[in-house]
Amino acid sequence: MSDLPLLDRRLVLVTGKGGVGKTTVATAFALHAARRGRRVALVEVAARDHVSRAFGLGPADVFRERPLTDGLVHVSVDAEPALREYLADQLPVRAMADVLTGSRAFAYLAAATPGFRELLTVGKIWELAQDTRRTPGARPYDLVVVDAPATGHAVALLDAPRTFADAARVGPIARQGRTISEMLLDPRRTAVLAVTTAEELPVGETLMLRDDLRRVLGAEPALVVANAVRAARLTGPEVERASAAAPAPVARAVRRAHDVTREQQAQLGRLRRALQGSDVPVVTLPFAGDGDLSPAELDGLGGLLGRRLERTAAAVAS
């Protein structure tokens, strides 16, 4: 694990295979950071608003910064409003931005340019992480936590500014692309938190993400969180005795639960062996239920994640 705690970064992107609970982990981590006194922005991309709904705020207005709890603000980001904000900031007359973004030809060009939506999205995320905000009167954040897209798209998001800077070479897009890329590639300011479940495919995708980050960005995830790990409550002989004494449906359920925990432990072992020798620690979170978690449950999960991060950091330092 890096000697720099995650809470001391300016930007943490949370990604993983779809369905592994990255929104839950991103929210828990953001709540933990807010508890530690940070002013935190929790960002959802592609105009998503799952977190604000979980906190009972209703549909989010894109770009509106809405408080969730003390020290924690929710922001929903999308590419098109990001383009309008960028043009309004860059052009001498705001009406010119409105004309351009309202132009069908310009909209087609923006939609057809590979990586352009990713560039606009990450550009707004970068703006949220600056001491001097582009948005008039907006306060800076100590930490921006991004509930990022699934792994492949997350790598594209991180690489978009450098790609456009290399293509443009000169001019404002090249300059700003390099500025954003410098922050994303700086491990003292930016970290990737990978989320997985202890299952074969998600673990495989996490290892592919590690390889892609190395290849594309020259970095590794700062942390892997194995989410929804079930506790092994019975030993093998106890399962046999319980199954023999129980009715058939109960016996099947007991055996099935035991098989799931054994498979999870096997996949955790595979994950840890693959990461052995690197600086990537693995922290587990328990299975917390099948449905959406309440704000109180998310806060509890954040507290648990914080304690396990501190224990991991202490073990690395000793």
Image (cartoon, rainbow, N blue to C red):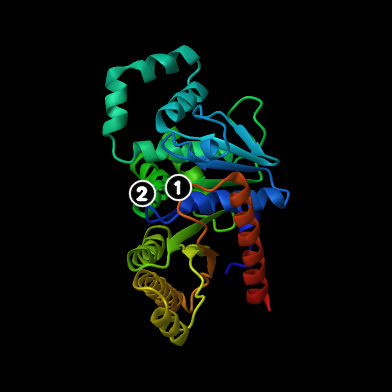
Q: Report crowding for label 1: few under 14, some 14 to 19, many 20 or more residues within 10 A (C-alpha).
A: many
Establish if 211 lies above or below 18. below
Point out the residue furthest to the right here: 37
Q: Is residue 208 left or right of residue 302?
A: left
Point 64% across, 69% down: residue: 313
Question: Label 1's element?
Answer: loop
The total number of labels drawn is 2
Amino acid beneath label 1 = Ala
Packing grade of label 2 (10 A; few <14, some 14-19, many >=20) is: few
229 relative to 206 in the view: left or right: right
Q: Position of residue 175 (x, y in %)?
A: 47, 39
Name the image quarter holding the C terminus. Answer: bottom right
Query: Residue 202 at what x, y percent from top left?
Result: 37, 63
Residue placed most toward the observer, 162 or 112: 112
**Residue kind at label 2, given as amino acid type:** His
Res 78 → quadrant: top left
Whether residues under marks 2 and 1 lie with C-beta atoms below 8 angstroms apart, the answer is yes
Q: Which one is in front, 267 or 54?
A: 54
Using residue 239 as the reference point, say whether residue 189 is left or right of it: right
Quadrant that contains the N terminus: bottom right
Residue 104 in sight: yes
Q: Looking at the picture, how far across and down is residue 191, in whole percent?
A: 53, 56
Is 140 located above or below residue 255 in the figure? above
Circle 2 SS class: helix
Quadrant hosting residue 136: top right
Identify the residue under disc 1: 148
Q: Does residue 170 appear in this view?
A: no
Residue 23, given in percent of the width and then of the height, sits at 48, 49
Using the image, determine if residue 188 lies above or below residue 199: above
Q: Which mark is residue 267?
A: none
Q: Which numbered disc covers residue 153?
A: 2
Residue in view at x 63 percent, y 55 percent? 300
